[in-house]
Image: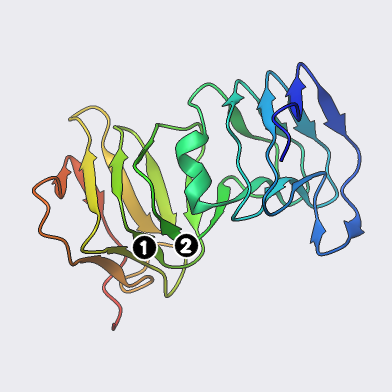
């Protein structure tokens, strides 16, 4: 967890075979942190960068993830707020998205427009303030949901030219569960937001 863990103008490539618990070219373990900027993660056997739920990415800017066999970035949902709009998240990777493992978001954060969709693989529990910026694209995996808990709020305000999209990974009615709002916070807002492909039983 040393703050001196830093990549700046670094290229890491050609690795990522199985070791420990994960296939990952760069692996950030629970409780660890990595500052990464102006760097390229490429040609991984599986995943470019994998960050455990309780890891942190304090500085993340202007990075490129390319030609990784499966996906460039596999993170926890709590890391999405650290991602920047200048990074290139899909340059020839096997899958065209950022893979996010569903979990609780317990601190206020803003999700900025990114160069690739985010695929949420499980339930996203919003326990603080989550603001989604115009142009953000969120794909939901089957049986997943977004749950706005009593302690949190969801503000998704796009624009006429930059719609926010929340949809199933595949376009099919009921592919994912939907958005469950349990909060009375007045900041719960959907504006210029397209929500589709959900509505399965819950």
Name the residue rendered at 37%, 70% in the picture. Answer: 176
Q: Position of residue 39 (x, y in %)?
A: 73, 23
Q: Quadrant of residue 65?
A: top right
Q: Around disc 1, counting alpha carbons within 10 Å, would you say few (fewer than 14), some (14 to 19), or many (20 or more)?
A: some
Q: Residue furthest bottom?
A: 201
Q: Quadrant of the N terminus?
A: top right
Horizontal side of residue 117 vs 187, given as left or right? right
Name the residue rendered at 8%, 48% in the picture. Answer: 186
Q: Position of residue 109 (x, y in %)?
A: 37, 39
Closer to the camera, 69 or 186? 186
Q: How is the image coloured?
A: rainbow
Residue 125 got which mark? 1
Q: Position of residue 97 (x, y in %)?
A: 56, 46
Q: Around disc 2, counting alpha carbons within 10 Å, would you say few (fewer than 14), some (14 to 19), or many (20 or more)?
A: some
Q: Which residue is mark 2?
A: 103
Q: Residue furthest front?
A: 2
Disc 2 vs disc 1: Cβ atoms closer than 8 Å?
yes
Q: Tally the marks.
A: 2
Closer to the camera, 196 or 138? 138
Judge whether 63 appears above or below 92 on screen.
above
Horizontal side of residue 76 vs 161, given as left or right? right
Q: Quadrant of the C terminus?
A: bottom left
For marks 2 and 1, give the CA distance: 6 Å
Q: Quadrant of residue 58?
A: top right
Closer to the camera, 20 or 86? 20
Name the residue rendered at 49%, 52% in the picture. Answer: 77
Q: Secondary structure at mark 1?
A: strand
Name the residue rendered at 59%, 45% in the picture. Answer: 96
């Amino acid at each position: 967890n040393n703050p001196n863990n830093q990549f700046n103008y670094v290229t890491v490539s050609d690795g990522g075979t199985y070791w420990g618990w994960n296939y990952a070219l760069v692996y950030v373990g629970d409780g660890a942190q990595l500052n990464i900027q102006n760097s390229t993660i490429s040609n991984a056997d599986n995943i470019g960068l994998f960050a455990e739920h309780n890891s942190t990415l304090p500085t993340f800017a202007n990075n490129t993830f390319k030609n990784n066999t499966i996906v460039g970035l596999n993170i926890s949902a709590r890391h999405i707020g650290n991602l920047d709009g200048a990074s290139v998240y899909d340059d020839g990777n096997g899958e065209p998205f950022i893979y996010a493992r569903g979990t609780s978001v317990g601190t206020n954060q803003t999700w900025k427009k990114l160069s690739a969709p985010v695929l949420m693989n499980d339930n996203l529990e919003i326990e603080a303030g989550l603001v989604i910026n115009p142009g953000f694209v969120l794909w939901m995996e089957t049986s997943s949901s977004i749950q706005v808990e009593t302690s949190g709020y969801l503000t998704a305000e796009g624009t006429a030219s930059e719609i926010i999209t929340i949809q199933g990974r595949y376009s099919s009615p009921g592919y994912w569960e939907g958005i469950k709002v349990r909060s009375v916070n007045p900041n719960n807002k959907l504006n210029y937001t397209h929500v589709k492909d959900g509505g399965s039983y819950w």
